């Protein structure tokens, strides 16, 4: 499919805020090239088990993050790209960018530099992923394997076949792996209780609501780890398409569905676990709605939260009616595990 792209360079300190501004204004088709992802691979070679670590990767650490936005190659797409450029002009010039908390204000706006606007074909993007995406263990049991790579699983492995497509969420990022680790723990604890409830009253078992599902990886992992069903929702139609392709590829269409939707409106689904791997600002905004989709005692797993925002996000989660059970940390990121009171 032909598309237009707009590449934006920013500073590491501004990356999360730039993502939040773009998503909050409806620009969700994006790719984030963050050199810190390379740093994590270099610092945890045994975790990632990659065979391409070399000096050229080390040079990547000197780059600044780049966010690439994608637009349809038509009149509407061009109008959206102009709208994105206008938004970036506004937030880079503002002394108080929209969405910054009092604790996060800086002198001057977000650091934004346009690198280029160009046309392309999404097959080029997919090919680049094939160069670097390898079978990777995420958590204790989940292994993510792209379709073009062979993998000999161990008896305890739960293998997800997944090609990333035009959506975020291959499982490599710390935020995704922490969510999977949280799901492993919660579902292991629920396993005996759910079995007893089902035997006693014919209960429906464990249901997961995956908010901002992306590739569908968390919904898929949750079902492989023992959940009975899952619903993934996303405001990006490309993500919904990719997630459903991955669900079909893993033979889980009878247990998982991905659909377009916003948790704050039009989604009618009661779950035992809500998982939301988003960003700090979105987690805070969506936490009250998440509580409305859970029964008392239900679990809420959130990530995409920088350590520096742990306190403010935790406060928002508590104010939404949750008790925080545990906070996981990995690098500069954290994940909050909470229960509805």
Image (spheres, helix red, strand yellow):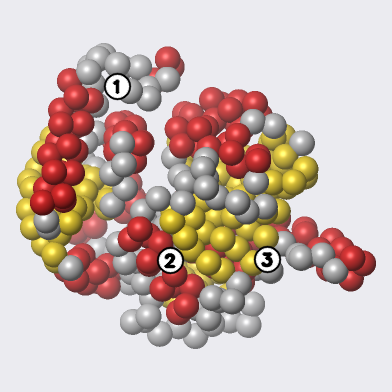
Neighbour tally class for label 1: few under 14, some 14-19, many 20 plus, Cα within 10 Å = many
Residue 135 at least partly seen = no
Image mark count? 3
The residue that label 1 is drawn on is 97
Identify which residue is drawn at 38% across, 67% down: 242
Q: CA distance from mark 2 to mark 3?
A: 17 Å
Q: CA distance from mark 1 to mark 2?
A: 33 Å
The residue that label 2 is drawn on is 243
C-beta proximity under 8 Å, tags 1 and 2: no
Quarter-of-image position of residue 22: top left
Mark 2 / mark 3, whichever is N-terminal: 3
Give left or right: position of 338 versus 213: right
Residue 17 x/y as whole percent: 34, 32
Mark 1 / mark 2, whichever is N-terminal: 1
288 shown above or below 146: above
Q: Which mark is residue 227?
A: 3
Q: CA distance from mark 1 to mark 3?
A: 41 Å
Quarter-of-image position of residue 1: bottom left
Foreground label between 1 and 2: 2
Identify which residue is drawn at 32% across, 66% down: 165
Find numbered disc 1 in the image and state the secondary structure of the residue it sits on. loop
C-beta proximity under 8 Å, tags 1 and 3: no
Mark 1 / mark 3, whichever is N-terminal: 1
């Amino acid at each position: 499919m032909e598309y237009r792209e707009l590449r934006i360079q920013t500073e590491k300190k501004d990356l999360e805020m730039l993502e939040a501004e773009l998503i909050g204004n409806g620009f969700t088709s994006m790719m984030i090239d963050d050199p810190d992802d390379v740093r994590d691979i270099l610092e945890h070679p045994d975790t990632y088990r990659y065979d391409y670590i070399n000096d050229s990767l080390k040079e990547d650490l000197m780059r600044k993050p780049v966010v690439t936005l994608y637009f349809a190659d038509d009149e509407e797409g061009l109008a959206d790209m102009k709208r994105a450029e206008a938004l970036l002009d506004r937030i880079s010039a503002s002394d108080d960018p929209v969405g910054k908390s009092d604790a996060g204000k800086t002198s001057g706006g977000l650091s934004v530099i346009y690198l280029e606007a160009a046309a392309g074909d999404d097959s080029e993007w997919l090919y680049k992923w094939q160069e670097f995406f390898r079978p990777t263990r995420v958590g204790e049991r989940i292994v993510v394997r792209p379709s073009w790579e062979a993998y000999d699983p161990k008896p305890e492995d739960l293998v997800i076949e997944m090609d990333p497509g035009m959506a975020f969420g291959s499982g490599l990022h710390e935020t995704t792996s922490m969510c999977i680790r949280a799901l492993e723990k919660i579902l292991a604890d629920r396993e005996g209780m759910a079995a007893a409830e089902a035997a006693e009253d014919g209960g429906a078992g464990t249901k997961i609501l995956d908010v901002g599902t992306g590739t569908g990886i968390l919904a898929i992992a949750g079902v492989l780890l023992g959940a009975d069903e899952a619903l993934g929702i996303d405001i990006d139609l490309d993500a919904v398409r990719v997630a459903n392709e991955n669900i079909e590829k893993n033979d889980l269409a009878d247990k998982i569905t991905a659909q377009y939707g916003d948790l704050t409106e039009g989604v009618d689904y009661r779950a035992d676990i809500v998982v939301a791997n988003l960003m700090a600002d979105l987690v805070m905004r969506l936490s009250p709605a998440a509580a409305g989709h859970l029964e008392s005692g239900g679990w809420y797993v959130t990530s995409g939260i920088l350590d520096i925002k742990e306190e403010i996000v935790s406060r928002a989660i508590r104010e939404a009616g949750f008790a925080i059970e545990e906070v996981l940390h990995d690098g500069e990121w954290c994940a909050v595990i909470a229960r509805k009171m």
